[in-house]
């Protein structure tokens, strides 16, 4: 182990003693009584993964997790800040929890995540939401037990703002909802500063977990029967940068690919400027990496991409996609596209549609630009009017729906291996399954078993969903 790796590994333990003491002290205060914790999550997979840690910590402290805020003695709201709408929704839900506190004054209400990492939001909670007991950001999850303990002991309300250089703690247990699918964070934060994005301000500087810690977690999951593991990071391609691990993201993928088992690894999100040929090469030579690539393009206009500070042109983006497709035939390619970035003209938007026609993504997550206070784009001139943004969004969806439908039509009649994931939330009586590329396939429930792989024949297709039946006619 090099000195730096040792330091990094040691950083994983930073704060562990006070963490353990706080967990034990809360447990003692709860005194073995059955007390419930309710955790509500907004936002992205990173937040879902963080909530699994919050749930793990709550259980460790002696809480029983529940789905009912009314019976909970501890309510945790994990918030998102990426668009204004997400913040408004979280604030309105937090407002509703006032009634829980009125009915049961002993309930502790904690708010965490990206929204409350912004000073003005933390202050707003403190001033205008007197029933909120504490708040802390994503880089302070490890402080949850100690902040809770102080409050339970009658201490003051606390509203913690993120530190400049957060550690990378390894001691928080995760309470995972499923045993066959898991998220594994490999890095935190983002240093890219895309001009529209709040994430670097709320999740802090990039920092990576050690390869040893990531490998140990993935190995443990595989050994316990997990079949599908998503490696998470705001920009996974920056994994290990400046950490002295001697292991970058392709290196990590190679290392994890050596773990034996019948599982697949996937990852998100990959920034196009850092997605290297080497990464596609490593994916192609690994028997364990799913043929799926989420590569957010954001726009097809070089002028807009430059104003967004994305660090690539549309041609460079297309070049990367060509290489990925050459190396990984059949790879499912998805993207994030934004409409209405400040100054986006009709011509810029036409370039985005053109990029979509050229690349032919399997699916696109589309976003209407939302100004975020403190980011450079929020104060750029020529903000696009809402009706224009709405119209562009509609046209974008129309194009992508027809492309997705055409691509999926080509899958009709094929037999595909899928992971069976549980009852469909939209189609009663159907089981939701996922292909290697993570396309949704609905199969009549009862015929297959959740948490297993199965071969299904695709019998019907649409833009968003495929339909199938078990290939062996079960
Ligand atoms: N407005 C709209 N969409 C945004 N995203 C990030 N910031 C904003 C914003 N201010 C989108 C980007 C990113 C995805 C996760 O969210 O497309 O890739
Ligand atoms: Fe935001 Fe850009 Fe970082 Fe993604 S890469 S989290 S869009 S700043």
Image: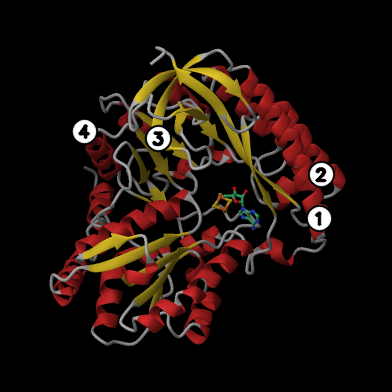
Helix, strand or loop status at disc 3: strand
Q: Quadrant of the C terminus?
A: top left
x, y percent for residue 315: 71, 31
Q: Is residue 245 left or right of residue 395?
A: left
User: Residue sitting at 21 percent across and 66 percent down?
Assistant: 61
- Look at mark 3 in the image and give the residue it sits on: 421
Q: Is residue 303 visible?
A: no
* Nearest the eye: 456 or 331: 456
x, y percent for residue 218: 28, 38
Could you tell me if the residues under marks 1 and 2 are in contact, i.e. CB atoms within 8 Å? yes
Asked whether mark 1 lies closer than 8 Å to ligand 1, one says: no
- Look at mark 2 in the image and give the residue it sits on: 348
Q: Mark 2 or mark 1, which is nearer the start of the sequence? A: 1
Q: Is residue 92 left or right of residue 32?
A: right
Query: In the rendered view, would you say 367 is above or below 273?
Result: below
Q: Residue furthest right?
A: 346
Q: Is residue 345 visible?
A: yes
Q: Mark 4 or mark 3, which is nearer the start of the sequence? A: 4
From the image, state whether disc 3 or disc 4 is nearer to you: 3
Indicate which disc residue 373 carries.
none
x, y percent for residue 243: 36, 49
* Nearest the eye: 179 or 331: 179
Could you tell me if the residues under marks 3 and 4 are in contact, i.e. CB atoms within 8 Å? no
Query: In the rendered view, would you say 78 is above or below 262?
Result: below
Q: Is residue 250 left or right of residue 92?
A: left
User: What is the C-alpha distance between the residues marked 3 and 2?
Assistant: 40 Å
- Look at mark 1 in the image and give the residue it sits on: 343
């Amino acid at each position: 182990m090099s000195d730096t790796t040792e330091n990094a590994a040691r950083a994983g333990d930073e704060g562990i003693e006070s963490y353990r003491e706080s967990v034990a002290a809360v447990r003692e205060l709860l005194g073995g009584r059955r007390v419930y914790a309710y955790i509500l999550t907004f936002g992205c997979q990173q937040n879902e993964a963080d909530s699994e840690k919050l749930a793990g910590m709550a259980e460790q402290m002696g809480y029983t997790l529940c789905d009912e805020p009314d019976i909970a003695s501890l309510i945790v709201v994990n918030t998102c800040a990426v668009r204004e709408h997400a913040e408004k929704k979280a604030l309105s839900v937090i407002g509703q929890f006032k009634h829980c506190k009125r009915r049961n004054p002993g309930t502790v209400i904690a708010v965490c995540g990206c929204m409350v990492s912004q000073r003005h939001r933390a202050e707003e909670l403190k001033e205008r939401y007197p029933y909120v007991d504490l708040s802390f950001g994503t880089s302070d999850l490890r402080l949850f037990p100690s902040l809770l303990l102080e409050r339970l002991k009658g201490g003051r309300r606390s509203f913690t703002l993120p530190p400049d250089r957060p550690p990378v703690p390894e001691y928080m247990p995760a309470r995972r909802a499923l045993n066959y699918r898991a998220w594994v964070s490999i890095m935190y934060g983002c240093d890219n500063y895309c001009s529209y994005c709040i994430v670097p301000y709320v999740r802090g500087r990039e920092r990576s977990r050690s390869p040893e810690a990531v490998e140990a977690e993935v190995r443990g999951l595989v050994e316990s029967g997990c079949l599908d593991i998503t490696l998470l990071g705001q920009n996974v391609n920056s994994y290990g940068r400046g950490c002295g691990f001697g292991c970058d993201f392709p290196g990590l993928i190679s290392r994890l690919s050596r773990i034996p088992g019948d599982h697949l690894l996937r990852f998100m999100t990959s920034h196009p400027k850092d997605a290297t040929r080497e990464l596609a090469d490593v994916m192609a030579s690994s028997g364990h990496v799913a043929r799926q690539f989420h590569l957010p393009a954001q726009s097809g206009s070089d002028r807009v991409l430059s104003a967004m500070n994305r660090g690539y042109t549309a041609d460079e983006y297309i070049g990367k996609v060509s290489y990925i497709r050459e190396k990984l035939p059949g790879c499912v390619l998805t993207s994030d596209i934004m409409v209405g970035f400040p100054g986006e003209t009709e011509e810029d938007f036409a370039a985005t549609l053109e990029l979509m026609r050229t690349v032919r993504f399997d699916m696109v997550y589309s976003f209407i630009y939302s100004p975020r206070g403190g980011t450079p784009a929020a104060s750029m001139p020529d903000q696009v009017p809402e009706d224009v943004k709405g119209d562009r969004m509609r046209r974008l969806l129309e194009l992508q729906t027809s492309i997705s439908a055409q691509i999926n039509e080509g899958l009709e009649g094929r037999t595909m291996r899928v992971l069976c994931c549980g009852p469909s939330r939209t189609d009663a009586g159907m089981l939701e399954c996922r292909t290697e590329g993570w396309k949704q396939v609905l199969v009549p429930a009862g015929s297959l078993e959740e948490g297993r792989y199965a071969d299904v024949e695709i019998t019907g297709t649409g833009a968003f969903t495929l339909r199938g039946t078990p290939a062996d006619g079960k």
